[in-house]
Structure formats: C-alpha cells, structure tokens
Image (cartoon, rainbow, N blue to C red):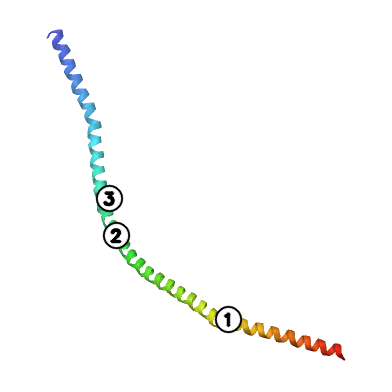
Amino acid sequence: MSVGDVAGLIAAIAFVLLVGLLAVPLLKLGRVLDETRDSVKELTEHTVPVLDETATLVASSNVQLEHIDTVTTAAAQVSENVSALTALFAATVGGPMIKVAAFSYGVRRALSGLVAGAGKGR
C-alpha cells in the first residue's frame, strides 16, 4: 500500500464518519417534521368543527339582529306617534287652558281691586 492509498482510505473513513454524524440530526429533523405534520392534522380536525359552529352562530346572530331591527323600528314609530299626540294635545288643550288661566287672573285682579276699593270707601 502506498501513501496515496492510505490517504484515500483515511479520507474514505473520514467521509463515512462525517455522513454518520450528519445523519443523526437529519433523522431527528425528520421525526420533528413528522410530529409537526401530525400536530397540524390534529389541529385541523379540531378547528373545522369550531369554524362550522362559529358560522352557525354568526348566522343565527344575524337573524336575531334583524328581529331587533324590527323592534327598534317599531319603537321609533311609537315614539314619533307619542310626540305627535303630545303636540296635538298641547295645541288642542293648551290654548284654551292659557285663555282660562288669563281670564281667572283677570277676575282675581278685578275682585281684589273691588275688595280693596270697598275697604277704602268705608
């Protein structure tokens, strides 16, 4: 065996050791990737039903919001009707009540003037 053969043999052994040392982390990385794939698969299996339930919940919430919108619209109409009724009542009853109050005030002033004048005349 020549020196070149020995050097080639040493290089071959070193290469085999290098490949062996690099194979261990690659195998561990392969296991990590397998675990990651399994975790993602399990997560997907559990997430899809949750998303379906969420979609159903949002749809039912939209239906409830439509009902609330109807109730709110009706309440606004009732409020408008009460406001109109109040304005009508104030216009119908308020004017005559002001006239009655003014008349009664005038009568009181007149009577108090008569009573005061009659008291001074005696």
Quarter occupied by the N terminus: top left
Circles 3 and 2 in contact, beta carbons < 8 Å: no
Find residue 7 and report its horizontal and vertical position in percent.
17, 12
Say what secondary structure mark 1 lies in.
Answer: helix
How many other residues sit within 10 Å of disc 3, few (<14), some (14-19) or many (≥20)? Answer: few
Residue drawn at 69 percent across, 83 percent down: 105
From the viewer's perspective, tell me whether residue 120 is left or right of residue 36.
right
Residue drawn at 70 percent across, 84 percent down: 106
- Gap between marks 3 and 2 measured at Cα: 18 Å
Q: Earlier in the sequence, mark 2 or mark 1?
A: 2
Residue at the spot of label 3? 43
Quarter occupied by the C terminus: bottom right
The amino acid at mark 3 is Leu
Q: Say if 94 sits above or below 115 in the image.
A: above
Q: Earlier in the sequence, mark 3 or mark 2?
A: 3
Query: Extreme right residue here?
Result: 122
From the viewer's perspective, tell me whether residue 19 is left or right of residue 96.
left
Residue at the spot of label 1? 95
